[in-house]
């Protein structure tokens, strides 16, 4: 389960997942970014990864760059912070791990629908 709001210059990524050993992990990244027709740049302000007793954080703030390609309403770039290829198309996007180990599918959620989803989770 995750949430990844983009503003005009900020990205806040939060995800909670469970592996095959039923071990939970979470990743949070707060960054500034810029997207142009030619380039995607991202500067992580901080990130934290937690899995069991393992906790890793990064405060390096190193700006990373990637080439953007656009074709028939499809926007593609490499997100260097997470080492994933991201493709925006229609009302969502996919994010694929560099080694194709996983593919995440994200869709835009309108605020009213998000509130309904929260209520469903609370009552479960």
Image (tube, grey):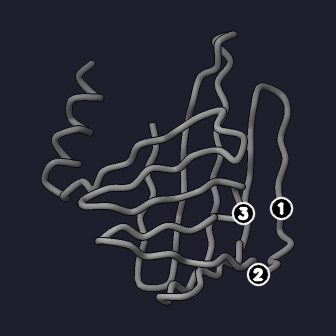
Of residues 67 and 84, the one drawn nearer to the viewer in this rendering: 67
Q: In the rendered image, which residue does mark 1 sit on?
A: 58
Residue 63 marker: 2
Q: Marks 1 and 3, Cα distance to the nearest angstrom?
A: 11 Å
Judged from the image, the secondary structure of the residue bearing numbered disc 2 is loop
Q: Marks 2 and 1, Cα distance to the nearest angstrom?
A: 13 Å
Q: In the rendered image, which residue does mark 3 sit on?
A: 81
Q: Residue at x 36, y 67 (%)?
A: 74
In-image side of 98 versus 107 (left or right):
right
Mark 3, Cα crowd under 10 Å, few <14 / some 14-19 / many 20+, is some
Of residues 68 and 117, the one drawn nearer to the viewer in this rendering: 68
Residue 9 marker: none
Depth-wise, is mark 1 or mark 3 nearer the camera?
3
Q: Residue at x 72, y 40 (%)?
A: 99
Q: Marks 3 and 2, Cα distance to the nearest angstrom?
A: 9 Å
Q: x and y percent of residue 87 in the render?
A: 45, 59
Judged from the image, the secondary structure of the residue bearing numbered disc 1 is strand
Q: x and y percent of residue 69 in the render?
A: 50, 75
Q: x and y percent of residue 50 in the render?
A: 74, 38
Chain-order first, disc 2 or disc 1: 1
Chain-order first, disc 3 or disc 2: 2
In-image side of 33 versus 83 (left or right):
left
Depth-wise, is mark 2 or mark 1 nearer the camera?
2
Q: Residue at x 21, y 29 (%)?
A: 120
- Quadrant of the rendering where the C terminus is positioned: top left
Above or below 61: residue 23: above
- Quadrant of the rendering where the N terminus is positioned: top left
Mark 1, Cα crowd under 10 Å, few <14 / some 14-19 / many 20+, is few
């Amino acid at each position: 389960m995750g949430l990844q709001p983009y503003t005009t210059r900020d990205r806040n990524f939060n995800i909670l997942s469970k592996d095959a050993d039923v071990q939970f992990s979470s990743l949070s990244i707060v960054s500034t970014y810029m997207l142009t027709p030619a380039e995607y740049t991202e500067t992580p302000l901080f990130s934290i990864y937690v899995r069991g007793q393992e906790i890793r954080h990064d405060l390096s703030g190193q700006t990373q760059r990637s080439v953007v390609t656009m074709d028939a309403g499809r926007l593609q770039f490499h997100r260097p912070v997470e080492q994933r290829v991201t493709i925006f198309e229609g009302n969502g996007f996919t994010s694929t791990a560099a080694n194709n180990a996983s593919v995440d599918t994200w869709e835009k959620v309108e605020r009213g629908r998000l509130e309904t989803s929260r209520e469903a989770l609370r009552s479960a």
